[in-house]
Image: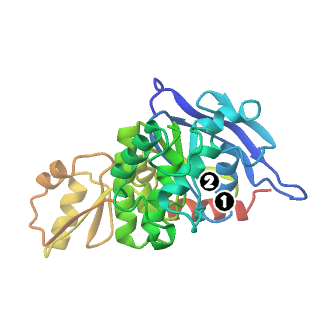
Amino acid sequence: MSTNSFHIIEVIGLTKRYRKASINAVDNVSFYVEEGSFFSLLGPNGAGKTTTISILTTILSKTFGSVTLAGYDIDHQAAQVRKNIGVIFQNPSLDRNLTAEENIRFHANLYGLYPYRPTFSTMPSPYQKRVTQLAQVLGLHHDIHKSVKTLSGGMKRKLEIIRSLMHHPKILFLDEPTTGLDPISRANLWQYLQQVKQKEKITIFLTTHYLEEAENSDYICIINQGKLAHKGTPQEIKDALLGRYIELNSSHRLKLQQELQSLNFKFTGSGPFRLYLYHHNPQKIIHQITTPLNHLKIIDPTLEQAYVKIINQDTAHNSHPTT
């Protein structure tokens, strides 16, 4: 991550131990998030993700460590922190007996943004303009005055995002935002979230079990058993643990193997061969091979594959402590 950007979130030595617990739920975790970036916090169930996000959103107190959001300390300036964040939790928190717009209006009133009025048309014009603008961005403008009971799961998620953005937060926390949505709804929601990120110039902080949703992150932290297991950009994480490689084969397998050896390429297998790229240009490597090939494939590991390897390695290491 760049050292020139403003760290809109800074977490140093964050530790949380619940009462009567024998181990820390979050154990000396440190990371930072750059302003305007897309950051993902990943980890299996029980890893400490929910505890971490609950502390960052001032819902839960920490045991040790230092945490600042938008320049405000969570211990001494919690009210200022809450003014700068929007939160979408995994479980929906909408009133099904109200319309979509009434849910937004009630929230805006509780937040002290606007005085309450009995109808949308009698609310102040800045409120009407903000609701209309966000509903347009999120594709909910045709349904904003419908009852929440009639909305689909994807529409309800969009409504929660509109509600969380009413006060112009600098950071949007998304805790498993697409849980329960079908694949098309998930894809549509992320399309709208990217538009919101660009138009609102907002920082997105995501926790998710759908690893493909984190592929476009600017930076990722993976925690396991309360500890930081790995961090970096998605590509850095994949390269460090798996690496891109070329899978190739030939009907003249022995000749191909001898050529790969003569070119000093590092490869594994006895056909098909796996040739790791190590940041090399695959086209330049392929161009050097003269043996006719009958199989050629460039493999770029997924974040999910790297994640599974990190968690398995970390869990194995922690379950066999050194003496």
Vertical arrangement, residue 94 with respect to residue 194, above or below:
below
Q: Is residue 304 visible?
A: no
Residue at horizontal 42%, vertical 48%? 217
Residue at horizontal 35%, vertical 39%? 199
- 108 horizontally vs 50: left or right: left
Under circle 2, the secondary element is: strand
Residue 218's tag is none
In which quadrant will I find the C terminus? bottom right
Under circle 1, the secondary element is: loop
Vertical arrangement, residue 128 with respect to residue 262, above or below:
above
Name the residue beneath numbered marker 1.
47
Crowding near the residue tagged with mark 2, few <14, some 14–19, many ≥20 C-alpha atoms within 10 Å = many
Residue at horizontal 30%, vertical 59%? 245
Name the residue beneath numbered marker 2.
223
Q: Total label count?
A: 2
Q: Is residue 17 visible?
A: yes
Q: Quadrant of residue 111?
A: top right
The residues bearing labels 2 and 1 have C-alpha atoms spaced at a distance of: 6 Å
Question: What amino acid type should be assigned to the residue bearing mark 2?
Answer: Ile
Measuring from the top left, give residue 258's x and y in whole percent. Answer: 21, 63
